[in-house]
Image: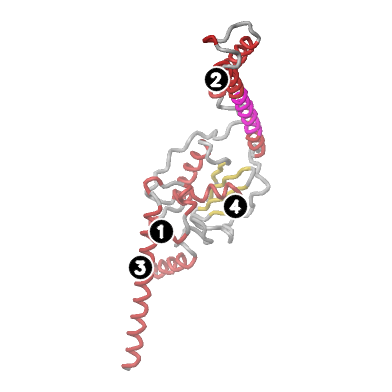
Amino acid sequence: MSDAADERVDGSDEASGADGEDAESIEALRERVEAEYDFDDFGPAEMASMSSEEWEAVFDHESWITGGELLDRVEADLKRRVAEREVFARVERRDDRLVAYSDEGYATVYADGSVEGHGTVLRDVKPTVALASMESYDVPETPPEDLLPEPQEVPEGSGELGNTMLQVVAGIQVLAGLLLIGGWLVISLGVVAPPGGGSVRSLNVIAMLLGGVVFLAVGVLLFGVVANARLSDKFRAEEYRNRLRAVELEPGERPEFLPDDEATPEGATGIPDEASDGLPGDGPDERSSESADGGTDGS
């Protein structure tokens, strides 16, 4: 009897020691994460760089928001990011999920916080889901429904004022360069005497030529910058129109790459990068134990 009691005591001591070491390691990880990240200015970019271990060490998973409220918060925040051109996607709300898709992929968000999909949309949606599940995160108001413009409404460029100012500066530079070179040419031909009674090869006359060349070169360079900027704006606008046309579907039409099954797929990933059935800490084992406890209480 005494030997068995001693073994139980030793086992409990080892378990308590292991728990203490785990608590110390989690506390050390929490201190490191809090020192590394600025949580007063915590956004999707910071969330995407965090590992699942760092996420669980800092945030209390019991306070995570799930269910319909999570979908509402994700929808509002994602639509705000689409309206501000941070994310390119069409956002559709279903009964038990939220779907965002573009010409480069899709993401489906479920009520338990699990996410499935591929491409850039999945990369952009994951941090949004993580932030929306936090009670401390203030979700902005939902913007108007017309988040993406029609292809024909996309302008060629938005920096026309800057281009015009550069053109004015370039014109002044070219004009100054031509005047200086013209003055040097007039003096060299003997039409006008050099200033100060000097010769054609005096330092002042040579400086006029060099200054004119520099001003002319700068003006031509600025004109080239303006032309390149306008050409780039034109290409970007056309590329954006093509992306809009790619996701412009008829009412009731679905993209071919969206899954048809209504069940949560086994490959859905949790937040931020860990494979799970939902948010970290809400795995199937915990949910099954919770349901078992509920059944015991009900009995």
Q: Main secondary structure of the magenta part?
A: helix
- Residue at coordinates 48% horizontally, 46% vertically from top-left? 74
Magenta residue check for 153: no
- Dot 2 or dot 3: first in sequence order is 3
- Dot 4 or dot 2: first in sequence order is 4
Q: Is residue 274 above or below residue 191?
A: below
Q: Nearer the viewer, residue 201 or 288?
A: 201
Which residue in the structure is indicated by mark 2?
169
Which residue in the structure is indicated by mark 1?
61
- Distance from Cα at disc 2 to Cα at disc 1: 58 Å
- Tell me where residue 105 appears, x and y as whole percent: 62, 47
Q: Is residue 133 above or below residue 26?
A: above
Q: Is residue 30 visible?
A: yes
Which residue in the structure is indicated by mark 4?
117
Residues at badges 2 and 1 in contact (C-beta under 8 Å)?
A: no
Which residue in the structure is indicated by mark 3?
24
Q: Secondary structure at mark 4?
A: strand
* Left/right of residue 13 with respect to residue 211 in the rendered view: left
